[in-house]
Image: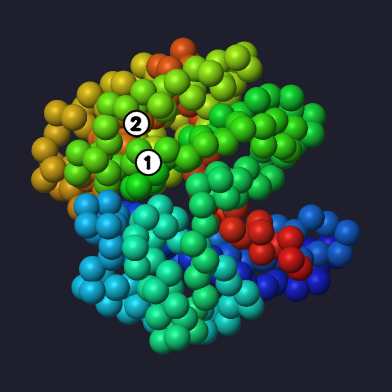
């Protein structure tokens, strides 16, 4: 390979409301060439921290123990993979928990892994770091919607710059626990109409595990936008299916099967509020933005 210099390994840990993930990436460094990345390994652990955070206001001892065990496992995996650098961020569940700071302090004490709790604005900004959205010749206005278990991040982006961003307490885990009020939906709708519709035509970019699964279930051609019509048809199919059928027929993880429909409704809501008929699903997420953040420090 021309100009080849070395391959490093970077790891990112994303502690979300519905699951936690460890992504290990190969970082290919060449002289006079942009850094390239490839996925080496992805481990997802279904710990639903949001169930505690959004219904009780704190993380239970049982889930703290599971989280510590997971971080200990991640530490060993990073060791055997010979990871050079790592970054660990926690989002909505831990920032909503009264004992969030206490937990990350305990994890660092017991495992050596340092975790930072980030706000919704930072979460949204990380998504835009992917190089596919930083083409200076592309004058498009992008509307990123990242739906998680506890929050939805909207980020408006153009020419490499964030124009506006907002985090809303609307997510799959909150919805299945009936924790999203009509007032919150109204605030969501009003922000969309007052801050995005005035910009004219925008490209909607859907992020998150649920929209990736919906896209796959729809049978849509990879690389092509998912039309609102096809999204609605897929959602109709999912609504009619039982929890068991979603796990057995569609092979969804149990912790995905119960949140995929409420999460999908958030994407539908945005598209309808924007009068948009399509959504692009590039299959990237927070972890990819975290990798980009580590690369900047090379």
Q: Is residue 213 visible?
A: no
Direction bottom: furthest residue:
110
Q: Is residue 40 above or below residue 166?
A: below
Dots 2 and 1: beta carbons under 8 Å? yes
| Mark identifier at residue 169 | 1
Residue ranking furthest to the right: 32
Instruction: Give the Cα separation between the discs numbered 2 and 1.
Output: 8 Å
Image: 125 above or below 166: below
Residue 113 percent coordinates (x, y): 49, 78
Task: Report the residue at 67% width, 32% height from top.
Answer: 163
The quarter holding residue 257 reads top left
Q: Earlier in the sequence, mark 2 or mark 1?
A: 1
Left or right of 41 on screen, residue 160: right
Percent position of residue 189, x then y: 41, 22
Q: Is residue 158 visible?
A: yes
Residue linked to disc 2: 184
């Amino acid at each position: 390979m021309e100009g080849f210099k070395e391959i490093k390994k970077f790891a990112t840990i994303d502690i979300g409301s519905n699951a936690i993930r460890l992504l290990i990436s190969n970082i290919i460094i060449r002289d006079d060439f942009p850094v390239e990345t490839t996925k080496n390994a992805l481990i997802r652990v279904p710990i639903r921290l949001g169930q505690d955070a959004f219904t009780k206001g704190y993380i239970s001892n049982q889930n703290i123990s599971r989280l510590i065990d997971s971080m200990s496992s991640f530490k060993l995996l990073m060791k055997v993979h010979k990871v050079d650098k790592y970054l660990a961020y926690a989002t909505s569940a831990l920032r909503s928990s009264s004992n969030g700071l206490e937990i990350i302090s305990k994890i660092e004490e017991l495992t050596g892994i340092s975790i930072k709790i980030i706000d919704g604005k930072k979460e949204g900004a990380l998504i835009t770091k992917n190089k596919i959205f930083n083409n200076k010749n592309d004058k498009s206005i992008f509307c990123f919607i990242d739906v998680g278990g506890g929050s939805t991040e909207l980020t408006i982006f153009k020419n490499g710059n964030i124009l506006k961003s907002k985090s809303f307490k609307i997510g799959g885990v909150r919805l299945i626990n009936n924790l999203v009020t009509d007032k919150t939906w109204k605030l969501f709708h009003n922000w969309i109409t007052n801050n995005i519709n005035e910009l004219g035509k925008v490209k909607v970019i859907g992020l998150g595990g649920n929209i990736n699964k919906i896209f796959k279930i729809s049978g849509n051609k990879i690389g092509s936008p998912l039309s609102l019509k096809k999204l609605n048809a897929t959602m109709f199919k999912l609504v009619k299916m039982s929890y068991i059928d979603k796990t057995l027929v569609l092979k969804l993880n149990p912790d995905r099967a119960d949140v995929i429909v409420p999460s999908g409704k958030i994407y539908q809501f945005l598209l309808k509020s924007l009068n948009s008929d399509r959504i692009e699903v590039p299959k990237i997420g927070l972890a990819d933005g975290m990798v980009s953040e580590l690369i900047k420090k090379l």
